[in-house]
Each structure stands twice: as structure tokens, then as C-alpha cells.
Amino acid sequence: MAATITLSILLLLTAGAGWFYLRLNGNITTFGADGVSQDRPGEGAGGSNVLVIGSDSRSGDNSKLGGGEGDVGRSDTAFLLHVYGDNKHAVAVSFPRDTLVDIPSCKLPDGGWTKPRTNVMFNVAFTVGETAKGNPACAQNTVEKLTGLRVDHTVVVDFAGFSKITAAIGGVPVCLPKNVYEGELNPNLGRQGKIIFAKGPQTVAGQQALDYVRVRHGIGDGSDIGRIKRQQAFLSSLVKKVKSQGFSPSTLLPLANAATESLTVDPGLGSANKLLSFAMSMKDIDLHNTKFVTMPWRYQGARVAIVHPQADELWAALRADRTVDGKDASGKPPARAAAASPDAARAGAGQTVRADNSPHLRGVGGPPPRPATPPRATPRGGGGARDARRPGLRCGHKRQRLQRHRRQGAGRPRGR
């Protein structure tokens, strides 16, 4: 997301330097459109949908950064970015990798097509065909079938590209609530190992930034859902860092190079000109108007199930180009705006639904599930927005600021 949001600035600046513009053009890799299903949802009321996938293949430069096993492209991170029609609001909806979904027929490298599959994990779609590049078209087909939303563009970012982007901007500020050790990043290590992240605020870049967004154990509850929340906050911090640095070519040119080298995109974004046109539609989006939410879910054994009707209401709100709090963001005059129900939009958007017995369902050989209990809904969209604005607040900053004010005799600080 950060790469696409900032490309408008990057490409505008580099357009004047013809040689560099051509270099960026040559960096971009596309995947074949022939794998995209012919049976697709229709257009929504407005806005555009971009599927963003993080690949952890060990092929090429990724092998130095600790990707997945072998050379098969895999993905533990995926979200659908909906850019509203007013070009001022956006929402990113994350898909838990273990979500049980139906995968439609997908094209294989040899030209054949798979049979549809039911009740399989979401991240399996990207591995269909077992190639190093993964199968973005199959992942796109799966998201369209799951959501009923037409995906306008698909972007894949690999490990090496993510590492280069964070290094190009001089790192991203994060804060750790406790020390994190090697054995928590790699549970197969068999020992605690040395500290890889010390407790407290710090700036991470390159390999360290990659480790921060990948680690599950040692931070939070150790689940993939907990990691999603941290990744959402990290993306917010990354975008905020890029915008805070201004339009200096010395900063933006390396970032433009790193961003375009890291992307595999659909043919609709397959040139610098196409990327520029798309990115320009996102240049006015402010972080305060950007939400990070997770698809409504609950645990089902060791896997994750979609919760209905909350999920259906979320997709309906996006199709109607309404924000997660039910407001019309189409940018059209009121008489022409989509007439989706605000109540329906509020009901499902930005919620995470969990079963009450979820603590007993996290491991594949764990205790058997208790009798099913009604799912409990907890709002999550607002939390993502708060993290976007002040990503480090949960790491003792407030307490440290209070102590500093008391030492200075200022009493209790106001606000926040």
C-alpha cells in the first residue's frame, strides 16, 4: 500500500529525468491476465479495489532474507484496498491467511486449469501451480469470489522489495513492549537465542523491518490475527514517514527505484505511465481518512471462518462506496450517490468477530472445541485509524511523557 500511495509523488518527480523514468519503467514486472477468471463481478457504485499481496518466496534475493520453504511463492499477508470515489478516503481490509474459503478454477503454468476447491485456506490460492512467482491471478479470482467485488488491480510485493523500501526511507519507527529473541522469530531454533529487538521505541529498516512484521511469537498473543494488527500499524507508520520527509529527490528517487523493483502487477499497471495515472488518484488520501480493518471472522478449530452476515454487509458497503461508518464517499452529488443503507454499512464494516472459545482453538493438536457459542463482535476499524495517526502510543510513551512532566513540575499533561 505504501508503495502505491507514494508513487504519484515519485513518478511525477522522475518524469523530468528521462533516463530514470525509463529505468523505473524497466523495473516493473507484470503477471499474465489470461489467468484472471472470465466470470467476474460487475462494477460497484464507485471507487476502485486493489488487492495487495505479500510474497515470501525464497527465490532470488529473497533467499538471503529468510522466506518460506523452497522456491514456491507463498503469502501470509493480503489485503484489499478500497479507494473511494471521492479520492480522499480509503480502507484496507485484511484477509487472515487461515480463513476457510472456496477457490475457483485457476490457471496452471502448463496452461491447464484446476478444479474448484471448497473449504481450503485463503493463502493456498497464491500457491496454485507452485511457482516462485506465486499465482496472483488465482488469488484475485478467489478474492472476487469471496467478496463479490471486482478487483481493478493486483499488486505483489516480495521480501526483498519490502526490505529495500524501508531502507530507502531511513527506517520506520516502532515500539516493542518487551524484548524479542531469535527463537521467537524462528521457533524451530530450539533455544531462546540472542535479542533481535530490545524493549522500547526504535527505528527498523531492511532485514530488521522484515523481521518485525513477520514475527508472531513474543509480541501480542502469538496469532496470525495479532500479527495482522501490527502489520497494519506498520504500514501506517511507513506512509506517515514517507510523507513527513517531503519531496526531496535524494529521498524519493531511491524509494521510487526500490518500489518499482519490488512490485509484480497486473497488466493494467504494467508501465510507469499507468502507475502514475493510478497513483495520482490516491495522492489526496490523508492518513486520517484511511482505515485498516480485518474481515469479520471467528475461529473454527485451528482455522478461521468468515462470519455472516457481517462480512456480507462489509462487502455491500464497499460496493456502494460507503465508508465503514456508513457515510457516502463516492464524491457524487447526493441525488446520484449510491443508496446503500448506512445501518448495513455500520453493521459489518471494520468488525472482527471471534468465538468465545477461541483461546482453545489456536493449535492444530490442541484441545477439542467447546460447544459453539454465539460470535461476539468487536469494532476494529477505529483502532486501525488510531494506530495510523499515533502508531507508537502503546509502548509506554504516554507513561514516559507523564513521568517527564512530573519531573519538570508540570503536573499531568493534557490530552491524549
Image (spheres, helix red, strand yellow):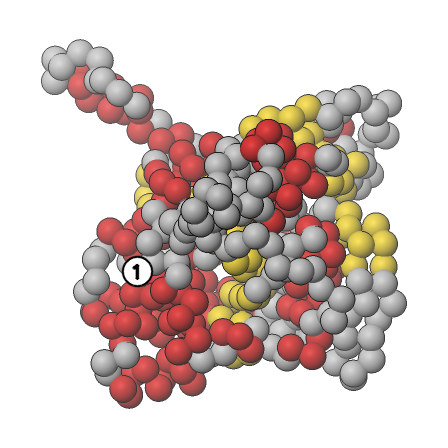
Q: Is residue 193 left or right of residue 404?
A: right
- Establish if 143 lies above or below 261: above
Q: What is the secondary structure assignment of the residue under circle 1?
A: loop
Residue beneath the point at 67% across and 31% down: 353
Which residue carries the number 1 mark? 169
Relative image position of residue 54 (x, y in whole percent): 56, 60
Q: Amino acid at mark 1?
A: Ile
**Residue 193 seen by the camera:** no
- Residue 353 visible somewhere in the drawing: yes
Q: Residue 232, image x and y in percent?
A: 48, 45
Please state which of residues 76 and 222 is positioned toward the viewer in this rendering. Answer: 76
Is 278 placed above or below 96 here? Answer: below
Residue drawn at the location 77% of the way across and 47% of the way down: 100
Q: Quadrant of residue 44?
A: bottom right
- Residue in the image at 83% along x and 28% along y: 369
Q: Residue 218, how many percent across, how many down? A: 54, 38
Question: Could you tell whether 157 is left or right of 36 in the image?
Answer: left
Residue 208 in the image: above or below residue 156: above
381 horizontally vs 407: left or right? right
